[in-house]
Amino acid sequence: MKKTFNLINEKIKYPRQVEAVKHDIKKYIKRERRKDLPKDVDFWDFSCKYGDTENEAEVIHLAEINKCIDGAEKRGLDSFYVEILAKPGHRTKKPQK
């Protein structure tokens, strides 16, 4: 998903539009995680970017997306850019003590 979300809508109030964007992102992540895993892959990992515009997007962790969207809401932005790409993930073993 590479998308610029617009938060301004004549028919939908600003806070409700922000919640709708969060829901769309959550729905996309769930859909990607349901896909069949290739061989030798343990889980679906995600590479994420967030920014006010596509050119300003910076790499973030998946868990930070809602915090970034809340920050955009506090700053009153009209739109922001989110990029979420699924990639194969491999578990690492914990070091033995």
Image: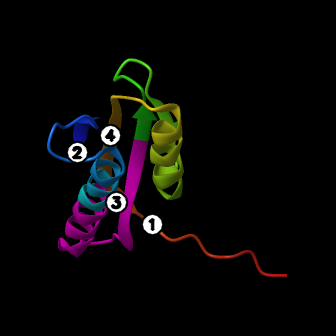
Q: Of marks 2 and 4, which one's residue comes earlier in the chain? A: 2
- Residue type for callout 4: Glu
Q: Is residue 6 covered in magenta? A: no
Discs 2, 4 touching: Cβ within 8 Å: yes
Q: Foreground residue, 84 or 26?
A: 26
Residue at image coords 20%, 47%: 12
Which quadrant: the N terminus?
top left
Question: In x, y percent, where is residue 29?
Answer: 29, 62
Of the numbered discs 4 and 1, the one sitting upstream in the chain is 4
Q: Label 4: how many residues lie within 10 Å, few (<14), some (14-19) or many (20+)? A: many
Do callouts 3 and 1 mark residues in contact (Cβ within 8 Å)?
Answer: yes
Left or right: where 74 falls relative to 22: right
Vertical side of 56 occupied by 24: above or below: below
Question: Given the image, on which type of amino acid does mark 3 rest?
Answer: Pro
Q: Dot 3 corresponds to which residue?
A: 88
Which class describes the residues within 10 Å of circle 2: few (<14), some (14-19), or many (20+)?
few
Q: Label 1 sits on what residue type?
A: His
Q: Residue at x 68, y 76 (%)?
A: 94
Nearest to the observer: residue 75 or residue 80: 75
Residue labelled with disc 2: 1
Q: Which residues are magenta?
A: 25-48
Indicate which disc, 3 or 2, sits on the residue closer to the N terminus.
2
Q: Secondary structure at mark 1?
A: loop
Q: Which residue is mark 1?
A: 90
Task: Name the image quarter holding the C terminus.
Answer: bottom right
Q: Residue tagged by mark 4?
A: 83
Residue 20 location (% of width, % of height)? 26, 56
